[in-house]
């Protein structure tokens, strides 16, 4: 899940941060990809418009 795409959905990084109850600087610290835990929150907040992507565990 790309930070840029989710921020565009909410209108801005600030509005994305507000929806999650975190600071805008925390969103900026994510970089290009939304952290896995936040992806699940966003999947719920967007009613599945964005799907959480999990990394396979190393063997």
Image: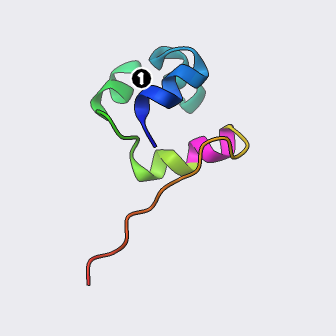
Towards the viewer: 24 or 2: 2
Image coordinates of residue 5 in percent, x first then y, are: 49, 29
Helix, strand or loop: magenta stretch: helix
Q: Secondary structure at mark 1?
A: loop
Image coordinates of residue 55 in percent, x first then y, are: 38, 64
Q: Quadrant of residue 50?
A: top right
Image coordinates of residue 26 in percent, x first then y, are: 35, 28
Residue 23 magenta-highlighted: no
Image coordinates of residue 16 in percent, x first then y, are: 53, 24
* Residue pictured at 58% horizontal, 41% vertical: 42
The local crowd at label 1, few if under 14, some if 14 to 19, many if 20 or more residues have their Cα within 10 Å, is: some
Q: Disc 1 designates what residue?
A: 23
Quarter of the picture holding the C terminus: bottom left
Q: Is residue 59 above or below residue 6?
A: below
Residue 8 visible from this viewpoint: yes
Q: Is residue 31 above or below residue 55?
A: above
Q: Is residue 28 left or right of residue 4?
A: left
Q: Which residues are magenta?
A: 41-45
Query: Across the whole image, how many numbered discs are drawn on residues?
Result: 1
Q: Quadrant of residue 58?
A: bottom left
Rendering colour mode = rainbow
Q: Is residue 15 above or below residue 33?
A: above
* Residue pictured at 55% horizontal, 32% vertical: 20
Towards the viewer: 28 or 50: 50
Q: Is residue 57 above or below residue 53?
A: below
Towards the viewer: 18 or 31: 31
Residue 42 magenta-highlighted: yes
* Residue pictured at 37% horizontal, 71% vertical: 56
* Residue pictured at 48% horizontal, 15% vertical: 14
């Amino acid at each position: 899940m790309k930070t840029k795409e989710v921020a565009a959905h909410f209108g801005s990084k600030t509005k994305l941060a507000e929806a999650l109850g975190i600071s805008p600087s925390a969103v900026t610290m994510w970089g290009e990809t939304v952290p896995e835990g936040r992806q699940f929150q966003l999947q719920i907040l967007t009613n599945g418009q964005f799907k959480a992507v999990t990394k396979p565990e190393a063997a």
